[in-house]
Image: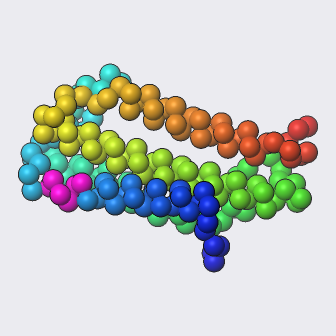
Amino acid sequence: MGEKIKGLNLVLEIAALVGLIFQLALIIFVWNILPEVIPIHFDFAGDVDQTGSKTDLLLLAGLSVLFYIGLTWLGYYPEKFNYPWKINPDERERQYSLARKFIRLIKAESVWIFAVISFQVVAVAFGKINKLSPILIALIVFATSATVIGYLSLALRNDPQCRR
């Protein structure tokens, strides 16, 4: 657990932490002026299809905190991951390093997705916008898919065990 974090790993850790702080600060900053009833669910077009208590926004923040803590902890144990192939002993360190980066990227993406959704919920609640941006929905699907595909393509590259 004493791994020194540097390079891209450090950038991803900072990005995740900044996203978490942004989301928590946003909620704290607007809490007293936020309406009691806010949008809590949106359809695929981004239109509000359910409202609820502003305390539901705390659930989103709680999920961010859980993702942040859980994925941070998980990143320390790449040897426990369920890989879809047998890890070649010669490639073990490379595979574990890639897996750690993947977990950190997923963590940063997850935290920022929740932060941006919180921001847009607040904007809808205040009447600044009337629906979630359809670009946000497409971006969420694209970013998470691209991350998984990118990780798998990098992990499979140059590993003789994976080319069979």
Quadrant (top left/top right/bottom left/bottom right) for the C terminus: top right
Q: Main secondary structure of the magenta part?
A: helix
Front one among 79 and 147 = 147
| Residue 52 in sight from this viewpoint | no
Would residue 27 be counted in the magenta stretch? Answer: yes
Residue at 57% in and 34% down: 145
Q: Taking 6 as reference, is 140 left or right?
A: left
Residue at 70% in and 53% down: 98
Where is residue 29 drawn, in percent x and y?
Answer: 17, 57
Where is residue 158 drawn, in percent x and y?
Answer: 86, 44
Q: Taking 103 as reference, is 117 left or right?
A: left
Residue at 27% in and 35% down: 41
Quadrant (top left/top right/bottom left/bottom right) for the N terminus: bottom right
- Colour style of the rendered protein structure: rainbow
Q: Which residues are magenta?
A: 26-31
Q: Residue furthest top?
A: 45
Residue at 42% in and 51% down: 111
Where is residue 161 drawn, in percent x and y?
Answer: 89, 46
